[in-house]
């Protein structure tokens, strides 16, 4: 099968479309890619030079159109997500063991299932209990999705922290009790006041920088829970061990996607949450481009579109 694939060029910030031949081997399926989400990791790769061209994209959704002779559990016509490679292409390949079936009516929105599965893993790691105060630091696509998952249930109070006003407004619409600007005021004092001096029971950091991770650590109550989803380590300039980590005696989880103790169950929970609207996928999808405009798409996503960008997808096939 001839496929049009987007390739990251040796020159940074340059994407070209190339034709290639893809055919499924014994345990593989060929997927007609409907859409593929733009991941923060893809944006990082976009800005870097490389030694050779690479295909990319890992948040794909599409329909199975052909399968190898060893494939038994996936049928032609099934809609699937998972490790479809490349994702930014008209067709991609995947092993049967790396695919998850999704309802056909999700269609292009299925491109959000993979990143939302990561959110599910993070939210479950936070283990918010009845009456907890939960703080989410960083309200991009994943932070807002986490707020939607956590807010409004079991007597929890959820507080959002982000420097972008439009994101704070959306966080309030999704159910937070407050949305704070980390620049405009003393966020630490505010959280202490809201919790009678205790601090937050659980804090989730999605911003992906050391300053945000350090702020997140300063908000956790003693013996509380810090979940670092952005991958950065809390820092305190001029000290060795970050005092709050020691004195607070709280549990710290670093939660990449592989943290999940039961990935199939996280996939199941995520798909059900999207279908039921617990994850407001359509509301968090702010930008859509055709594959032919992928260069423009990455330029816009990298720049943030004046703070309006939350999540974008590339539509590889119409219909």
Image (cartoon, helix red, strand yellow):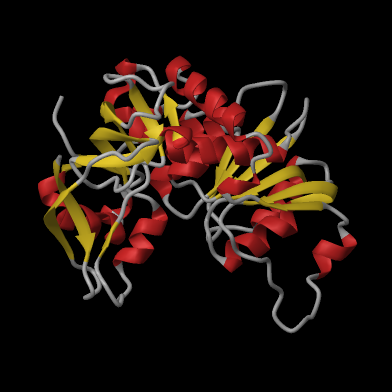
Count of marks, rendered view = 0
Q: Quadrant of residue 102?
A: top left
The extreme bottom residue here reads: 238
Q: Position of residue 222 (x, y in %)?
A: 87, 51
Q: Position of residue 299 (x, y in %)?
A: 22, 60
**In front of the other: 151 or 42:** 42
Residue 258 visible (yes or no): yes
**In front of the other: 299 or 78:** 78
Residue at x 33% of width, y 52% of height: 307
Residue at x 59% of width, y 67% of height: 211
Please state, as top left, top right, bottom left or bottom right, where the C terminus lies in the image: top left
Residue 287 visible (yes or no): no
Q: Is residue 20 above or below residue 65?
A: below
**Left or right, 160 with reference to 144:** right
Q: Position of residue 176 (x, y in %)?
A: 57, 33
Q: Is residue 165 above or below residue 76?
A: below
Q: Is residue 81 above or below residue 52?
A: above
Please state, as top left, top right, bottom left or bottom right, where the N terminus lies in the image: top left
**Left or right, 318 with reference to 251:** left
**In front of the other: 273 or 143:** 273
Q: Quadrant of residue 237?
A: bottom right
Residue at x 27% of width, y 73% of height: 52
Residue at x 31% of width, y 17% of height: 104
Q: Position of residue 165 (x, y in %)?
A: 42, 48
């Amino acid at each position: 099968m001839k496929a049009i694939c987007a390739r990251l060029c040796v020159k940074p910030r340059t994407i070209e479309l190339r034709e290639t031949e893809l055919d499924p081997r014994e345990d593989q399926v060929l997927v007609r890619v409907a859409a593929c989400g733009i991941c923060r990791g893809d944006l990082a790769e976009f800005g870097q030079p490389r030694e050779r061209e690479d295909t990319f994209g890992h948040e794909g959704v599409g329909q199975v159109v052909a399968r190898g002779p060893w494939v038994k559990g996936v049928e032609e016509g099934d809609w699937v997500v998972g490790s479809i490679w490349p994702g930014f292409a008209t067709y991609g390949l995947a092993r049967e063991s790396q695919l998850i079936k999704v309802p056909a009516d999700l269609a292009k929105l299925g491109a959000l299932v993979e990143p939302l599965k990561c959110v599910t893993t993070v939210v479950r790691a936070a283990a918010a209990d009845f009456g907890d105060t939960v703080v989410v630091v960083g309200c991009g696509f994943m932070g807002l999705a986490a707020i939607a998952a956590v807010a409004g249930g079991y007597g929890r109070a959820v507080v959002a922290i982000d420097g972008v006003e439009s994101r704070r407004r959306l966080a309030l619409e999704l159910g937070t009790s407050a949305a704070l600007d980390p620049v405009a005021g003393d966020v630490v004092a505010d959280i202490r006041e809201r919790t009678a001096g205790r601090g937050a029971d659980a804090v989730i950091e999605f911003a992906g920088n050391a300053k945000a991770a350090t702020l997140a650590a300063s908000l956790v109550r003693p013996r509380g829970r810090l979940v670092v989803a952005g991958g950065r380590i809390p820092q305190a300039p001029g000290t060795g061990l970050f005092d709050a980590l020691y004195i607070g005696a709280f549990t710290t989880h670093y939660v990449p996607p592989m943290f999940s103790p039961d990935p199939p169950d996280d996939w199941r929970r995520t798909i059900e949450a999207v279908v039921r609207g617990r994850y407001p996928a359509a509301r968090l999808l702010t930008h859509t481009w055709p594959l032919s405009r992928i260069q423009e798409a990455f330029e816009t996503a990298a720049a943030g579109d004046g703070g309006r960008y939350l999540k974008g997808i590339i539509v590889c096939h119409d219909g």
